[in-house]
Image: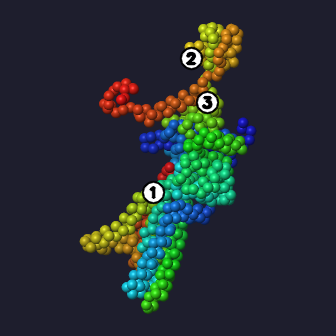
Amino acid sequence: MTAVAPEVGIDLDRPRVPFTRLVGVELRKLADTRAGKWLLGTIAAISLLVMVVMLWVGLAEDVNLGFTDFLTGMNIPMGVLLPVLGVLSVTSEWSQRTALVTFTLEPNRGRVLAAKVVTGLITALFAVIAALVAAAVGTALMGALGSGETSWSIDASQLVGFYAGQALALLMGITFGMLLLSSPAAIVVYFAWAFVLPTIFGVAVAFIGWFGDVWPWIDFSAAQTPLFQRGGPSGEEWAHLAVSGTIWLLIPFVLGWMRVLRSEIK
Amino acid sequence: MIEVQNLSKRYGDHLAVDDITFVCRPGTVTGFLGPNGAGKSTTLRMLAGLTHPTAGQATIGGHRYTEIPNPGAQIGVLLDASAQHNGRAGREVLTIAAQTMGLPKKRVDEMLELVGLSPKEAKRRVGNYSLGMRQRLGIAQSLLADPKVLILDEPANGLDPAGIHWMRQLLRHYADRGGTVLLSSHLLHEIEVIADEIIVIGNGRIVAQGQKEELLAGAGTFVRALEPDALARALSVAGIHVTPATADGFTTDADPADVGKAAAAAGVALLELRPGDRAGLEDLFLQLTAGDQREALAPAPAPGFGPTAPQGGQA
């Protein structure tokens, strides 16, 4: 019966899955599901909507909006939806249980997570390009339809800062996703962090005297604001960003990463 | 070759897998049989490096799964056919797997055809698939790279009888070409149809293993005669010990040939002579299933609840 039964040769000398291929697969997975398509479509649609509303208000109120104004407006939809994209890129592997296949095809979980991070950074880049296009269209229309000169001026540090802001938002999403491994929990916790916590900080600053000195060092959202100012953050602002980023991004990121590496994939 | 050595997995107080050892050889289809919760899936997950063992080791061709580069290209794994993104089309599921492994796209079409998923079905989202279709998709994925080893968890679950025979053919051809197959099931008849070797697991321990024929062969012989008393005497003279089984029949540990010869020598007319019922494995499996706590606890009502009337007393 076992006439043709050569010993199974498992070949250890084959190349492992190249990292670029893992990134390619992750990029594809971002857009090949119904949820992914909707999310990307929604980001594009809301960005356009924001542009149109800003244009309309600008024209009606006779406020001359410039390129950076439009770009700042794009921050709102992207700051909400890109983190969700980051969360889902991790948690959908658990909620849909595709982690079983993903980590069977690449058992080195760290490489998969790294591919997800790189994919997130690339996605943020595409989002920024889309925002630049929308802002340019808005500015051009403003110039054509409005009275007076429209300002196209933007400096390189603002562009880099704008990208950094979107990338950080997406990384926060990935971080919360890795920490909680559950789509609803991670999204809720992220929104609480992004929208409720700053309010609490604001109240604390108003009522607790000493908290005003501590606050800039622990509010990661507020620390990101100078990224978009002309000339970029100052020395102290960089320090604020580094300290609050360590608290809210770096440490949770490391903990989440370790959780994924150690957890049992079921 | 798949080698599992003294493998254990403990969750808190619960020993899900308790010191199991077995080997799957090239050219054979090994069936991993056990009731739900026996530790089959945990064992297979440990083989694929998704669950860290508490003790022991599991290797494929002498290597741990996690140290094999691009393992999907050498080992086909299907751990749960339902574990696919519901919003992704069937074809897309295979495409991303093929892309990860670095396979040409034509393999996707070849595998879809092999498992009998039409181009139209392949375009539908997995969320709209029946369990049987998901199984076919999962099997297609595990076969994409034409691997030497296949590890399949409950692959026949959700397949109709024709589908189970189709799988038998598929895995038979695969094993005949030198492949090693390990598949699990909680249903004896599935394993019976598909596997050559059987490993039976219950409560985390291996309770039986061997070739299917050996395990399924019942003990001894059943024999029935026109004159049972005369038969009993004849067999007794021949030194064959019998146990009455029916009004006119006996079972015995002896070989059917010896029983027939003894009866012929004594001139006893037989009505029936055949190998004993293949009760061995089935009994063992039933015991395992009955010993399962789910089964034992389910029918017992809470103490003091309802009348303690005998069965059949319901209105």
Nearer to the camera, A31 or A93: A31
Q: Give SS at disc 2.
A: loop
**Type of amino acid at the residue the image marks with label 3:** Leu
Q: Nearer the viewer, mark 2 or mark 1?
A: 2
Q: Chain of mark 2?
A: B
Q: Give SS at disc 3.
A: helix
| Alpha-carbon span between mark 2 and mark 3 | 22 Å
Q: Residue at x 63, y 33 (%)?
A: B212
Q: Residue at x 55, y 54 (%)?
A: B126
Q: Position of residue B226 (x, y in %)?
A: 63, 11
Along the polypeptide, which appears first: circle 2 or circle 3? 3
Q: Position of residue A139 (x, y in %)?
A: 47, 84
**Type of amino acid at the residue the image marks with label 2:** Ala
Nearer to the camera, B136 or A144: A144
Q: Chain of mark 1?
A: A
Local packing at callout 3 (Cα closer than 10 Å; few below 14, some 14-19, many 20+) is some
Residue A220 visible in the picture: yes
Side of A184 where A211 appears, left or right: left
Residue A165 picture quarter:
bottom left
Instruction: Provide the residue designation for mark 1.
Output: A181
Instruction: Provide the residue designation for mark 3.
Output: B215
